[in-house]
Amino acid sequence: MNPLGARVTALIAEDEAPQRRALHEQLQQAWPELEAIALCEDGVSALESVQAQPPMVAFLDIRMPGVSGLDVARAVAEQGGLVVFTTAYDDYAVRAFEAGAVDYLLKPVQPARLEQAVARLRERLEQRRSGAGGPDLEALIEGLESRLRPRGERLVRWITASAGDSVRMIGIDEVLFFQAQEKYVRVVTADAEGVIRTPLKELLAGLDPDAFWQVHRGTVVRVQAIDRVTRNELGRHTLSLKNHAEHLPVSGAFLHRFRGM
């Protein structure tokens, strides 16, 4: 019997299929009443799932390609859900999570540790049911993101892009947006553009998340270049830029970035 007296739904986001399946199977053993409503292989699909059906609990890998577990956690927190992060790196995780996160799990996940996390989640859910508050998850996410932000040699500084019959060196400060197109990624500046073969999800790992935002599965935009986001009569959102005439689509999974702008 479920002691919470209600259905408890969960989302699992992990880009490695064997680990995703293993965590799901372990959760079925440790928490039989938990209903996994989404098993996601990347951050974008996790965001889309949160938008469509917000989970009560989310188990999120921090270092997913493209959209990170921190971005997904923000969306979950905005919907009132709880978060457990999974990570293979304990060098930065322990102190940060013990400062106030619901919990974290080191990979490979050990059954005894998972049972402990489940007990804590049950307690937090019961506290919420009785009206008690919880940790400031948004503040925790901000602190974690600052520690995980690419620095030094990890940051992309130049893009070598093909432009017709030539190759152009584009400084990262010139780029307005990146847009995936079949086998290539467009690199667009205020007055020119080129293409690169590096997948967008790999490129994101070297971009400063304070300077570039993903706004669509295939689009990453410089924040300072954004002029406005407009909603049309069909409910679809598009983004306009300050120094470029092109309008870019914004998917619902990323609209949370623009709240309060």
Image (spheres, rainbow, N blue to C red):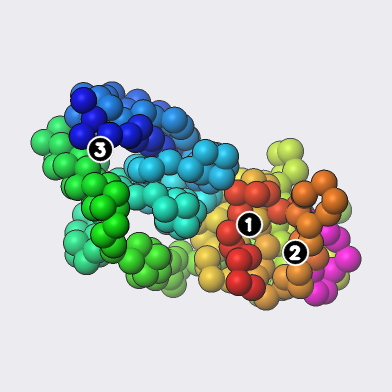
User: In the rendered image, is residue 109 in sight?
Assistant: no
Q: Residues within 10 Å of mark 3 (few under 14, many from 20)?
A: few
Quadrant in the picture for the N terminus: top left
**Residue toward you, 28 or 41:** 28
Q: Earlier in the sequence, mark 3 or mark 2?
A: 3
Kindly identify the residue that appears in the image at 53 percent across and 71 percent down.
Answer: 210
Relative to 239, is 116 on the left or the right? left
Quadrant in the picture for the C terminus: bottom right
Chain part drawn in magenta:
241-248
Q: Earlier in the sequence, mark 1 or mark 3?
A: 3
The three-letter amino acid code for the residue at tag 2 is Val
Residue 67's spot in the image, x, y percent?
52, 51
Kindly identify the residue that appears in the image at 78 percent across and 57 percent down.
Answer: 231
Kindly identify the residue that appears in the image at 77 percent across and 49 percent down.
Answer: 235
Relative to 4, is 79 on the left or the right? right
The residue that mark 1 highlights is 255
The three-letter amino acid code for the residue at tag 3 is Leu
The answer to which quarter of the image holds residue 9 is top left
The answer to which quarter of the image holds residue 132 is bottom left
Give the foreground label among 3 and 2.
3
Kindly identify the residue that appears in the image at 33 percent across and 66 percent down.
Answer: 136
The three-letter amino acid code for the residue at tag 1 is Leu
The residue that mark 2 highlights is 229
Tag 1 near tag 2, CB within 8 Å = yes
